[in-house]
Amino acid sequence: MKACGKGLTFLFLLLVISIAPSGTASAQSADQAAINRVLDQLEEAYVNENMGLLSSLISDSGFILLIKKPADPSMALVLNKAQLLDGTAKRWADEDFLEHKHVNRRIIIDGPIAKSISVMKEQTKARKKMESPIFHILAKEDTQWRLVFSASALGDE
């Protein structure tokens, strides 16, 4: 988290601010479990290089914000679903992943929208390790929770 800087910390805090969760406790519990399954499946898809599974977990209208250098906003990338899947395929071709985990998850559910904040930990076979904060917004599309927005900091500043 220290590599992210104050600006990125502010961005994540701003994104997290929301009204109190709504819905019954049992619905919240079922949604919480479903969202955790989606995040677990994201991890599984990434490590096993399962593009079909990864694609099924992301909304067709989904996009991602990658912050390469938190101190330089001009280095940020915004990718739609197709670009994200293409970039992921290229990354899989370049690196073999041993781990891709979302740890210290915090999930906030507000009706058909959920926010998840965690730390993404990755490790490749070449022993390259990376940790970065990650923020997801998921939406319930019909009965399935899908990722509609993700923001993470990949930078070293």
Image: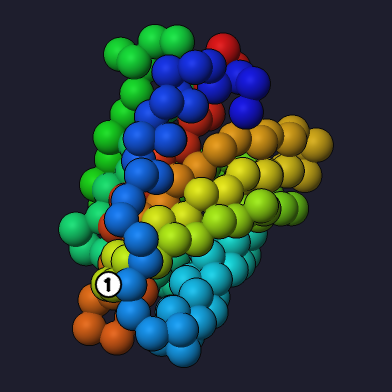
The residue lying at 54 percent from left, 22 percent from top is: 4
Label 1's element?
loop
Query: Where is residue 146, by image quadrant?
Result: bottom left
Q: Amino acid at mark 1?
A: Pro
Residue 89 shows in the view: no
Query: Where is residue 128, by image quadrant?
Result: top right
Where residue 132 appears, as percent x and y from the top left, is 59, 35
The answer to whether residue 59 is left or right of residue 117 is left
The residue lying at 53 percent from left, 29 percent from top is: 154
The residue lying at 73 percent from left, 43 percent from top is: 123
Where residue 124 appears, as percent x and y from the top left, is 72, 43
Viewer-proximal residue, 155 or 111?
111
The residue at which mark 1 appears reads as 112
The answer to whether residue 34 is left or right of residue 140 is right
Quadrant of the snapshot with the C terminus: top right
Position of 68 relative to 16 (above/below):
above
- From this viewpoint, which residue is outermost toward the bottom? 26
The residue lying at 27 percent from left, 48 percent from top is: 63
Viewer-proximal residue, 83 or 28?
28
Position of 95 relative to 10 (above/below):
below
Where residue 65 appears, as percent x and y from the top left, is 34, 37
Position of 135 relative to 54 (above/below):
above
